[in-house]
Image: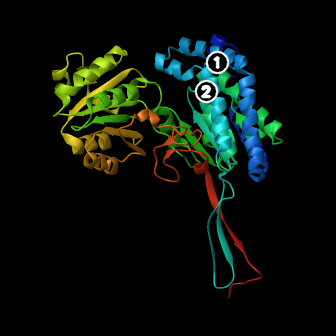
Amino acid sequence: MTAAALEETDVAGAVPGDVPSGDVAGEVRRLALSAKEAGRVLARASGDARNTALREAAGVIRAREAELLAANAKDVAFGREKGLSAAMIDRLTLTPDRIEAMARGLEDVAALPDPIGTVLAEWDRPNGLKFQRVRVPLGVIGIIYESRPNVTADAGGLCLKSGNAAVLRGGSESVHSSGMIGDCLRQGLVAAGLPGDCLQIIRTRDRAAVGAMLQASGLIDIIVPRGGRSLIERVMADSRIPIIAHLEGICHIYVDRAADPDMAREITVNAKMRRTGICGAAETLLIDKTVAAAQLPGIVDALAEKGCELRGDAAAQGIDARIGAANEADWDTEYLDAIISVKVVDGVDDAVAHINRHGSEHTDSIVTDDLNAAETFLADVDSAIVMHNASTQFADGGEFGMGAEIGISTGKLHARGPVGAEKLTTYKYVVRGAGQVRP
């Protein structure tokens, strides 16, 4: 371990299974190679075997709840020592309910249709050749994420469901929790007669591990980063491997002039305050100028009661003195905290223009009873998820019926929006002949 990593682990105990000192890159490549070799077995395994592994892993997670909570306590202590915000501590913390949700999530993924082997298209040619386009795994997926240890279960489970091996590197603050969740998944694989090496956890706080993953072309086929802007920017700048990008969630609620006041208030409070530290949390409230004076104070009442800080433009401040001054940076900030920026806008077109200028193409919602305004918003906002009369906190693969998600892709190639098992596949062409040769 590096000196810096040793200093970090003094807070919460030694990191189990950490990589050898000075050989982070070598260990990452060794783990990736093991995943690649084991992944060949997984790719050929039946859907029943993969589903059994997921259900077995869910049982192990439940059986090891006390151990998981103890490991997580070390991570939370480390996070507090690092000075993480309350919202980030919430992202990091496991509870019995969250552990049960992880287990149920794995079972939900197991219950989904098998994405592997699906014939997407087939046709015959006049020369007698028969063509099929068939869904197959991507290969080895490298996932780099921060804080939330449940990502280990979600991402690992989806990779296994879709026949992909996985190399996971969680945040330095979640190393104990993520490592133990990974062990549970590996136990599930072994119980199903599949190689545990299909899933590898990089157990180090040394940031060199991220760089090593990004350079492991030929061993890792796809990189999926989940985290803040600095992580995403580093991955996009340094990776030699294709990326499914999960950029920050600068999500908006737009309260239209035809919004029901009670609905607008309830949706805004839920979108911001249900869980402030997730990527689907609303960060900006836009409200039409014709209803701002009537509706904004009630929304401020409800947000303030929940402990939310509000920062707004001059028009919003003029309506309610509890709103502090926003600066230009606020419109481009993912707070992941009990803070929301507020702007008064001139109709749906102005709201759309603001979102397309300042949003992160993640999730945005309009509250309105005007179907024409709703359709304009849904068509013109250039985001992966657009909503009408619903909280942005529904931006979650589980809520979409996908069982879980590996992230919300804000890119436009290969996958967009919640990335479930089906999106972790590619396809191959299978051609069957009877001795044909090309003239």
**Secondary structure of residue under mark 1:** helix
| Residue 119 placement (x, y as % from top left) | 65, 63
Judge by depth and name the residue closer to the eye, 320 or 89: 320
Residue 262 - label: none
Note whether 258 is above or below 416 in the view shown: above
Report x, y in % for residue 43.
Answer: 74, 51
Mark 1 lies on residue: 72
**How much space separates mark 1 and mark 2, taking CA atoms?**
9 Å
Q: Quadrant of residue 156?
A: top right
Q: Residue at x 67, y 30 (%)?
A: 103
234 and 315: which one is in front? Answer: 315
Q: Write down the quadrant of residue 208 in the picture.
A: top right
Return the residue nearer the eye: 52 or 221.
52
Question: Looking at the image, which residue is at 51% across and 32% down?
Answer: 227
- Residue identified by numbered label 2: 149
Label 2 is placed on what type of residue?
Answer: Pro
In the picture provided, is 410 more to the left or to the right than 209? left
Is there CB contact under 8 Å for labels 1 and 2? yes
Q: Quadrant of residue 410?
A: top left
Task: Indicate which disc, 1 or 2, sits on the residue closer to the N terminus.
Answer: 1
- Which residue corresponds to the image point at 69% horizontal and 13% vertical from the top-left? 13
How many marks do you count on the picture? Answer: 2
**Residue 209 visible in rendering:** no
Q: Is residue 92 left or right of residue 182?
A: left
Neighbours of disc 2 within 10 Å: few (<14), some (14-19), many (20+):
many
